[in-house]
Image (spheres, rainbow, N blue to C red):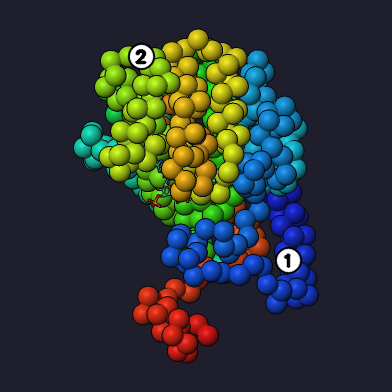
Amino acid sequence: MEKLKTLFKSKADALAGEIKDIIKEHGTKKIGEVQLAQIYQGMRGITGMVYETSLLDAQDGIRFRGHAIADLQKKLPHADGGHEPLPEGIFYLMLTGELPTKADVAELSKDWAARAQNTPAHVFKAIDALPINTHPMTQYVVGVMALQTESIFAKKYAAGVNKKDYWSIMFDDSMNLIARLPVIAAYVYKRKYKGGGTVSVDPALDWSANFAKMIGYDKPGFTDLMRLYFTIHADHEGGNVSAHTTHLVGSALSDAYLSYAAGMNGLAGPLHGLANQEVIKWIFEMQKSLGSEQPTGEQIAAYVQKTLSEGKVVPGYGHAVLRKTDPRFTAQQEFAKKYMPNDPLVQTVWKIYETVPPILQSLGKIKNPWPNVDAHSGALLTHYGMKDYEYYTVLFGVSRALGVLAALCWSRALGFPLERPKSVTTENVKAWLKGVDTIWD
Ligand code: HAX
């Protein structure tokens, strides 16, 4: 992978120079202003960090280095016989800003398969120490944390390393970690749902095909679904909980393992990545409660009202930034239209899509009534037989590694400092409102 590493470094050096000049010339210019409500309400809309790998537009959705998902489905290399982009390609794109060739992507597949060999036994032992009913996300994060013994960054930092070399050891750690994540994820799956067993990587397969094979899902279509899934969940600019957490923890010079594990703990929250399990759970509960596999629009509407009246959210709907249907939802809907248009669960997801937005809109307080990425994925996985919905967020987590670790390489290469925003107390705020000098003035 020397070629990719060298290409990344050349891009990073060029950008680091530009950033230096930008700060020197324009560093005192203001970007927006912060309103009091924003600091109480989750810092929505405050531009507060630089994150190179992707950018989210409220109307158009995510752009990976300027490319929309629908374009990338055509522009990124596919596996022989496959119809969806290989996630290796989106990693290459996020890391370098360049679209990879088929050969670039094949090289990455081979490199990751090689790095994934001989995952240390203590990683599996650490997972095995947990009760079997432990949530798969917890088992996954414990596996990642156990693998931290392999961090080159941590070892070299302890021995004393020049800060100019941080990028290189962050790159090596990121590549090793990404390579082994499907192994950890597959081990957790087999342990929890298939009575256990070892997992091993086939050097001839790509990252997604290896994962599908390790978990025992070799049905036609599932591997391609994994390629699409791992591509579209990879990144969503820097402010979302998993990306921001990884970035924040990494800013303390925590290594890739520590930083990514922290991000995964954020992904495991129900308002973020866990929403994919919540969606399918909610649909199964609705079907059970109504005694119907394919409820009508009226039945769904009544169930949505019941959910809202119980003080719960409708999972899979709404977004902190997006104000339109998530293009990641649309990409999955297109996949379903092509391969499983008559699946009753898929049709129910589409019926929910017709029914929910007007109801949420009518409440008058929800800024985005449209579906997000999590509204569709469970129906696709269930179609291929994967009904173990508590596992779904692990799949999201494997994919998210591509974005947050590419971004972490950028943060170290650009020498981004420790992140440390200012906080205030309500006492401060009240004093400030009365015109008293406060510590932030
Ligand atoms: N169902 C019911 N109420 C909702 C709602 C939904 N789907 N989405 C937003 N609201 C409510 C909020 O809870 C909030 O209510 P209160 O004022 O009573 O606190 C109000 O509408 C305003 O919220 P908002 O400004 O529109 O949305 P936020 O930026 O605060 O929150 C969330 C964004 C994604 C957290 C929110 O839409 C939500 O809870 N959605 C359901 C959970 C979900 O699908 N999460 C996954 C999001 C995508 C993602 O990260 N995937 O990993």
Tell me which amino acid carries mark 2: Glu
Quadrant in which residue 124 is drawn = top left
Q: Position of residue 435 (x, y in %)?
A: 47, 87
Tell me which amino acid carries mark 1: Ile
Q: Residue furthest bottom?
A: 437
**Which residue: 70% across, 51% down?**
8
**Which residue: 58% across, 43% down?**
323
Query: Helix, strand, or loop for circle 2?
Result: loop
**Which residue: 30% across, 43% down?**
311
Q: Earlier in the sequence, mark 1 or mark 2?
A: 1
Left or right: where 23 falls relative to 45: right
Q: Disc number at residue 44? A: none
Residue highlighted by disc 1: 19
**Which residue: 54% across, 15% down?**
221
Query: Helix, strand, or loop for circle 1?
Result: helix
* Disc 1 and disc 2 in contact, CB within 8 angstroms: no
